[in-house]
Amino acid sequence: MKSKREVLIKLFISTLYLSAFTFGGGYVIVTLMKKKFVDEYRWIREEEMLDLVAIAQSSPGAIAVNGAIVIGYKLAGMAGAVTAIIATIIPPFFIISLISVFYNAFRSSFLISQMLEGMQAGVGAVIAVVVYEMAEGVIHGRNPASVLIMTGAFAAACFFGVNVVLVILVCGLLGAVRTLIARKRKEGKDT
């Protein structure tokens, strides 16, 4: 990896660009962050990205900002987290400020309402891609416990109507237990 300053500059420009041109919320930006930081820059492994997304989802607040925080922190510590936060919040802050000035004109505009309705279809497609790619990463990891947890979480949320917060907490607890067991096994082998 390059010097920390170069990483911070590239991180700032990348997260600013992603935040400025992403419509549809946090799950859309997560896909684009994966493409940028995993596929293009190769700064983060795909497995790490899945872990970072899980952390971002389970933290309170907007997933786009949480995702930027964990990726920035992973790449450059606290300076990276602050850089990513600033770059991620600048575009929405500017856009919302601009919209608030012209709110009455936007509210009654047929063209604007149709554009936003059309964007909904694109957002749905991007979210479907996120789900597919994340599931593919878990399945290709060939860890039966991970596949079982993923399938159970999906079934609990979609078929049984279990509150997503509860699903996230249970999955986080299962992940912590698995990590502790793996560490104990490793310590047992090392001694």
Image (spheres, rainbow, N blue to C red):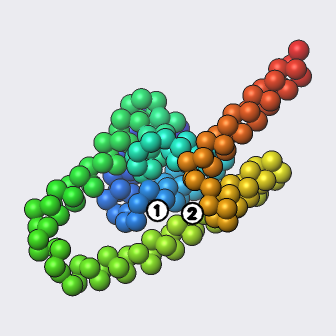
Closer to us: 43 or 84: 84
Tell me where residue 119 appears, x and y as whole percent: 38, 76
Residue 157: image quadrant is: bottom right
For the residues labelled 2 and 1, the Cα–Cα distance comes to 7 Å
Q: Quadrant of residue 106?
A: bottom left
Q: Secondary structure at mark 2?
A: helix
Name the side, left or right, on which 31 lies relative to 180.
Answer: left
47 and 143: which is toward the camera: 143
Q: In percent of the image, x 38 and y 42: which residue is there?
A: 84
**Residue 29 percent location from the top left of the image:** 45, 58
Q: Nearer the viewer, residue 90 or 59?
A: 59
Label 1 is placed on what type of residue? Val
What's the residue at 10%, 62% (across, down)?
A: 101
Residue 23 in percent (x, y) is at 37, 66
Residue 112 place in picture, x, y as percent: 23, 78
Residue furthest out toward the top: 191
For the residues bearing labels 2 and 1, Cβ distance under 8 angstroms:
yes
Q: Is residue 163 above or below residue 112?
A: above
Label 1 belongs to which residue? 28
- The label shown at residue 130 is 2
